[in-house]
Amino acid sequence: MQRRLAISAAYDDAGGEALVRHDQHQRRAVAILDLDPDLAQDMHPTRAIEARTHAIAAVETLATGSWPADVLDIVDPRGALGLLVIDGILSRDLKLGRATLTELIGEGEILRPWSSPGHRAIAPPAAVWTVLDTARVAILDRRFVARTARWPELTTALLTRAMSRSRSLAVQLAIRSLQRVDKRLLLQLWHIAERWGRVSPDGTVLPLALTHKLLAGLVGARRPTVTTALKELTQEGLVTRRDDGTWVLRGSTPRELREIYAMLS
């Protein structure tokens, strides 16, 4: 049974955190290649025109706030590719004992929030999804797969997107293995910039206000340690924070990050 998604957020009176209500519903069908034309880059123009009329998917809007994985379970996973992020940014937090592993997922990437049906001796850790910036996701269900079967170039493009997310997570894990927290933090910020940053006269601007808590989950450190590391990076002129909370990176992609990319390519 498909669950209804929310398009609004409320605030918990006790903790003040944004909680998503899922008593409202908004869904509309769109041509995926209109929203994400890069998916057709390997198609002949004539085939792309034909594919456009068949590559139709429902799009949901996700309000900012926390989304339990079962609420995001909005599609029958049998034969489905997953959810394609059209825009916005989400995070996924996995609790591993006292530690938290945070992953950022954004435009063009594919996610499958539901639990895998495979048999495991140990249950997987619970995941908490948070929409950091209002996101739209396209539902690539079994019907979408059937309608687009004549265009394997599209399936290949979507598979490439899924592999790209896996590679990005591998980069993050490689960064987390470094000893110095300030180095981990700098490389992680640049890794985010490589995915979604934009160049400005002041430097490379990251797309959202990343909190110290979120950064701690990304680099595998305690929040006070991240705060200290950010102060050091700021004093060195490598990182600055704008009044709106967004971060600006100075210089170019660090050599260590380029080496990690080369190793995982």
Image (spheres, rainbow, N blue to C red):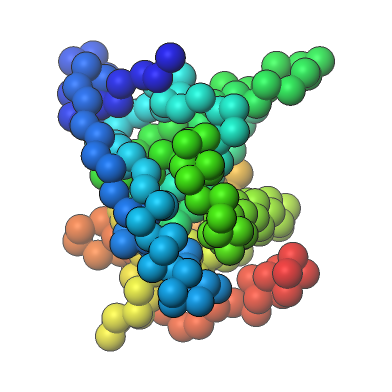
Q: How many marks?
A: 0
196 versus 95 height, above or below: below
* The quarter of the displayed image where residue 37 is located: bottom left
Q: Position of residue 10 (x, y in %)?
A: 18, 23
Q: Position of residue 62 (x, y in %)?
A: 29, 36
Q: Identify the residue at horizontal 74%, vertical 65% (top origin).
A: 264
Q: Identify the residue at horizontal 21%, vertical 32% (top origin).
A: 26
21 versus 131 height, above or below: above
Q: Position of residue 199 (x, y in %)?
A: 35, 79
12 versus 136 height, above or below: above
Q: Identify the residue at horizontal 35%, vertical 74% (top origin).
A: 198
Q: Residue furthest right?
A: 121
* The quarter of the displayed image where residue 172 is located: bottom right
Comparing 203 with 73, the one in front is 73
Comparing 22 with 3, the one in front is 3
Q: Identify the residue at horizontal 73%, vertical 69% (top origin).
A: 265
Q: Quadrant of the N terminus?
A: top left
Does any portion of residue 35 appear in the rendered image? yes
Q: Please indicate whether residue 177 sits to the left or right of residue 204 in the image.
A: right
Q: Please indicate whether residue 205 sits to the left or right of residue 14 in the image.
A: right
Comparing 196 with 184, the one in front is 196
Q: Position of residue 187 (x, y in %)?
A: 57, 65
Does any portion of residue 222 appear in the rendered image? no
